[in-house]
Image: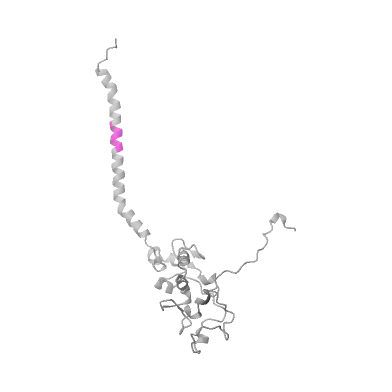
């Protein structure tokens, strides 16, 4: 025979009440914390969305001063800030060759494709083979300017725009700072080297380098 079940007594109920009260308090705290967390998320959502939207916008050098203050516009000259173009050091002109108008200003322009024999004999055009000619990049009338494919004249300081017409992927990487050399602030004004600082515009392919032996470790240097 099974043992008779003990009926609840007032003494048993006294032991159960503290456990039920503790559980109720924990449940109330849990729901209160959840409500507070939800309210905090809802209140901060507009600000977070605004920050995310602002971060998704690509800001140019012309906007650095308004966004980050004057301290972050170091390295940007006035002209660059006004045009919104990249700040670069002076182009690597050969000595005594610029401005081109000092010689070309008194010469009658000639657009005949030919081998240069009077001047610039040292230039060997190895950039596009037979498809390229001097006046594809240099303007016919104003030799102090470069000419884009749509006819827009640009200064030599903006030659990256000319290169970017054909080398779009390199231009994209150059702007992002993963091709070429860039100095400055990671979140502010930057200074870029032009394509021509590393590549000869007339023969951009790097020339082969003669291999050299490795450096001698200090412990092997004879005194």
Say which of 59 and 138 sits in front: 138
Q: Is residue 197 above or below residue 20?
A: below
Helix, strand or loop for the magenta stretch, by majority: helix
Please say which color scheme the image uses: one colour
Q: Position of residue 101 (x, y in %)?
A: 50, 85
Q: Position of residue 197 (x, y in %)?
A: 54, 71
Q: Position of residue 186 (x, y in %)?
A: 46, 61
Q: Image check: 210 left or right of 143?
A: right
Residue drawn 29% across and 45% down? 38
Examine the image and state in which quarter residue 32 appears.
top left
In the picture as drawn, the residue positioned furthest to the right comes out as 223
How many numbered circles are shown?
0
Q: Image check: 74 left or right of 18?
A: right
Residue drawn 31% across and 48% down? 41
In the picture as drawn, the residue positioned furthest to the front comes out as 130
Q: Is residue 150 above or below residue 60?
A: below
User: Where's the C terminus, which quadrant?
Assistant: bottom right
Q: Position of residue 90 (x, y in %)?
A: 51, 74
Say which of 88 and 26 sits in front: 88
Say which of 140 and 196 sits in front: 140
User: Where's the N terminus, which quadrant?
Assistant: top left
Q: Image check: 95 left or right of 64?
A: right
Q: Is residue 145 above or below residue 41?
A: below
Residue drawn 43% across and 74% down? 79
Asked if the magenta segment contains residue 192, the reply would be no
Residue drawn 50% across and 80% down? 134
Examine the image and state in which quarter residue 51 appears.
bottom left
Tell me the magenta residue range: 24-30
């Amino acid at each position: 025979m099974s043992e008779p079940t003990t009926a609840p007594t007032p003494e048993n109920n006294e032991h159960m009440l503290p456990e039920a009260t503790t559980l109720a308090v924990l449940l109330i705290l849990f729901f209160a914390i959840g409500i507070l967390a939800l309210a905090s998320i809802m209140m901060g959502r507009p600000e977070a969305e605004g920050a995310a939207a602002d971060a998704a916008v690509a800001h140019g050098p012309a906007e650095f001063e308004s966004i980050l203050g004057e301290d972050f516009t170091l390295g940007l000259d006035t002209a660059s800030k006004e045009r919104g173009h990249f700040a670069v050091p002076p182009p690597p002109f050969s000595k005594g060759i610029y401005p081109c108008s000092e010689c070309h200003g008194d010469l009658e322009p000639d657009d005949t494709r030919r081998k240069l024999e009077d001047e610039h004999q040292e230039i060997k055009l190895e950039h596009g083979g037979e498809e390229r000619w001097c006046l594809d990049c240099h303007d016919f009338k104003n030799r102090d300017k470069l000419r884009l494919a749509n006819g827009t004249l640009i200064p030599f300081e903006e030659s990256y725009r000319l290169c970017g017409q054909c080398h779009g992927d390199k231009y994209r990487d150059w702007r992002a700072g993963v091709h070429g050399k860039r100095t400055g602030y990671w979140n502010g004004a930057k200074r870029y080297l032009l394509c021509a600082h590393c590549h000869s515009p007339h023969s951009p392919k790097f020339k082969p380098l003669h291999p050299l032996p490795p450096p001698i470790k200090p412990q092997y240097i004879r005194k």
